[in-house]
Amino acid sequence: MKKTGSKLLIFSLILVQSLLAMAVGIAVLFDASGREIPVNVYAGGQDIGARGYEEAAEAIKADYEARFGSQHIRLKADDGKIYEIPFTSIEAFVDGKATVEPLKTLEGIGDIPRLISTHFGNHTTVLAPVINFNESKLRMKLIELSDDINKAPVDARIFYKDGLIEKIPDDPGISLNVNNAVELIRKQLSSDPFGEIDLMEGNALDIVYADVTMKDFDEIQVVLGEYSTSVKYQGLAISIGEAVKAINGIRVAPKGDAPGDSEFSFVEAILSGAPDIFFDEGLCQVASTMYAALLEAGIPVENITRLSHKLAVDYIEPGLDAVVAEDAYDLKFSNPFDNEVAIYAVKEGSVVTVAIAGNRDDRTDKSVIRTQIVQKSSPPVYYVENRDLKPGEKVVLDPGKEGVTVRVYRNDELISTDTYEAESSIVQIGPSIDPDKRNK
């Protein structure tokens, strides 16, 4: 028992001596760390080793102050462009004392290996600068830069061209997230204040998605039907152009959707897209072109509301015209298909084209439209005496138009019959002694 007690006493004495030596060593280490910067210590590229702490702190502060006076925070956007914020504009400065503080701080036993390595090791220690700045001014600078950095999204586009439906994909935009950008900058300043900061990191740039994407055009795939007419009177070119713009791109929901969504009104589209337009024959020409396109697209006639002119017009075949007026006549149709359809209208030179586009699953057999005149009536002649002409001499001022009854067939199916009145012919005639030969 005496032998075991002696061993325990010896072990205890050794342990006490070791702890005492360790305590003394820590005290010496702590004293050394508080008096002088160890060798091989750098801050911002400046060697501050073997200097006193106050001297080193002032040197660090002066070095960064000089560099901050001429350099900028460099921000890289998603397009690779570099945007700069002067350090002076955000009142940035380095706290020299806080920068060197980790060299002499002993917060717990876990810091002992670090102090030993720093003071007695052979490796190089690089101190990260402790940078302070005016956060409010940084935020204001970022808000100013956001006007240049932000990019609005571009909607997907779909249009008719040369008989085909063409689509251009949407392009997402970006928006600078000021809160995240501040934190990203703060992090960068704590390590390398002069390094380039990529705003794509740290969610500093938010993606802004377009309102209209390619998915919105999934149902519009092919041209179901189209028709073209020629502009005969240039005086109607302006109203025709405005009407084309007003109806171009309108999409009509499929059957079964909310009531009214699956019906199109030409008059309502014009009043919405061109509210100041005067309803003249130019609008009737666009409506007539559209009516013919609807027939080509296979829209059932029971889904179309249309009224023909009293007199045949000269820009489209009889039976294919449609008259519209702001408060009286309209061209309407409802979508009979399972997918939406879209209306496209273009005016190129003197040619107006309206196309009806939709899903290929709704495409019926190609529609062949033909008209057949089944009856004609000669125009009445209205004679006007002109004493400058020789007796019996005639001059036709207006040949008038024949009256016709026309049938319209789609793939040999009779779909409409229209009758157009004859338009009087006006003829000047020389004096005659027989009044019965006048004004017949």
Image: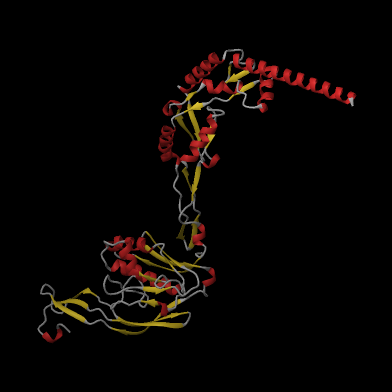
Left or right? Give the position of 294 relative to 234.
right
- On the image, the x and y values in percent for residue 378 come to 27, 83
Left or right? Give the position of 7 relative to 359.
right
Relative to 346, residue 116 above or below: above
The quadrant the C terminus occupies is bottom left
The quadrant the N terminus occupies is top right
Residue 38 visible, this orientation: no
* Display coloring: secondary structure
- On the image, the x and y values in percent for residue 130 come to 53, 26
Q: Give the camera-side residue of 331 and 52.
A: 52
Left or right? Give the position of 195 relative to 400.
right
Q: Residue furthest bottom?
A: 436
Q: Which residue lies furthest to the front in this view?
A: 2
- On the image, the x and y values in percent for residue 287 come to 35, 70
Left or right? Give the position of 47 relative to 368.
right
Q: Give the camera-side residue of 168 and 124.
A: 124
Residue at left offset 27%, top offset 67%? 279
Q: Quadrant of residue 50?
A: top right
- On the image, the x and y values in percent for residue 35 come to 60, 14
Residue at left offset 51%, top offset 68%? 359
| Number of numbered discs | 0
